[in-house]
Amino acid sequence: MVACRRNQVIKIIMKKILPFLFSIIPFLMGCSDLALPTEIQLNSSVDGKNVIVFSNQAFTLELDAHFDGGYQWDYEISDTNVVGIDSVSYRAKEAGEMKCGGLVIETFYLRGKHRGQSAINLIEHQSWEKDVPPINTVHFYVIVK
C-alpha cells in the first residue's frame, strides 16, 4: 500500500510539478538574459546592411586582412555612445601557424552600448598612401534596442 502511494506521488511530481519548474527556471534566472540572442558573427557581407543588437550585446566582425601587402583595416564609428569596439584580434585564415605572406583574419569585437543608431565604416588601405583609394571597404549601421 505504501509503495503504491509512493508511485502515485512520483507520477504526480513527474507529470505536473517538474514541467512547471522547468517552465519557470528561465524566469528565475533573469528574463533579461533570455532577450539576448546568441552572439552575432558578421563578415564583409554585412556591407550596406543594418544590424540590430541589444544594449550590452557583444558581436564580432571578421574581415580578411592583406597584411602581407602592408594593408590594414581602419575604422570609424559615428556614435561611440551607441556602439564600441572592445578589442581586435588576428588569426591565420587557414589552420596552423601564421605564415609569411598568408591571409589573416582580423576580428573586431564590438558591443552595443546604448539605444540609438551608429554607422560603422571600415577601409582596408596602406596608411602611408594618402591619395590611393582603399582596396576594400565595409559600411554598415548598428541599431541598438
Image (tube, rainbow, N blue to C red):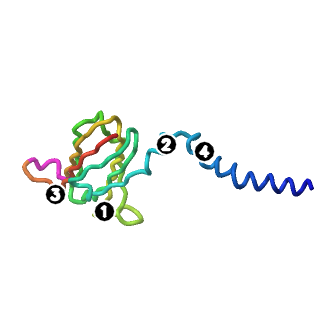
Q: Which x, y percent locates residue 105?
A: 32, 58
Cα separation between marks 3 and 4? 51 Å
Q: Disc 4 vs disc 1: which is toward the camera?
A: 4
Pick out the residue farthest to the right.
1
Cα separation between marks 2 and 3? 40 Å
Q: Residue at x 59, y 48 (%)?
A: 23
Q: Tell me the kind of residue under disc 1.
A: Cys
Q: What numbered label is drawn on residue 135? A: 3
Are the residues flagged by discs 3 and 4 in contact, CB closer than 8 Å? no
Disc nearer the start of the sequence (3/4): 4
Placement of 84 over or under 20, stated as above or below: above
The residue wearing badge 2 is 33
Q: In the image, which residues are magenta?
A: 124-130
Q: Secondary structure at mark 1?
A: loop
Along the viewing direction, whichever of 83 and 16 lies nearer the viewer: 16
Q: Residue at x 29, y 33 (%)?
A: 81
Q: Secondary structure at mark 2?
A: helix
Q: What numbered label is drawn on residue 100? A: 1
Quarter occupied by residue 119: top left
Q: Tell me the kind of residue under disc 3.
A: Ile
Q: Secondary structure at mark 4?
A: helix
Quarter occupied by residue 83: top left
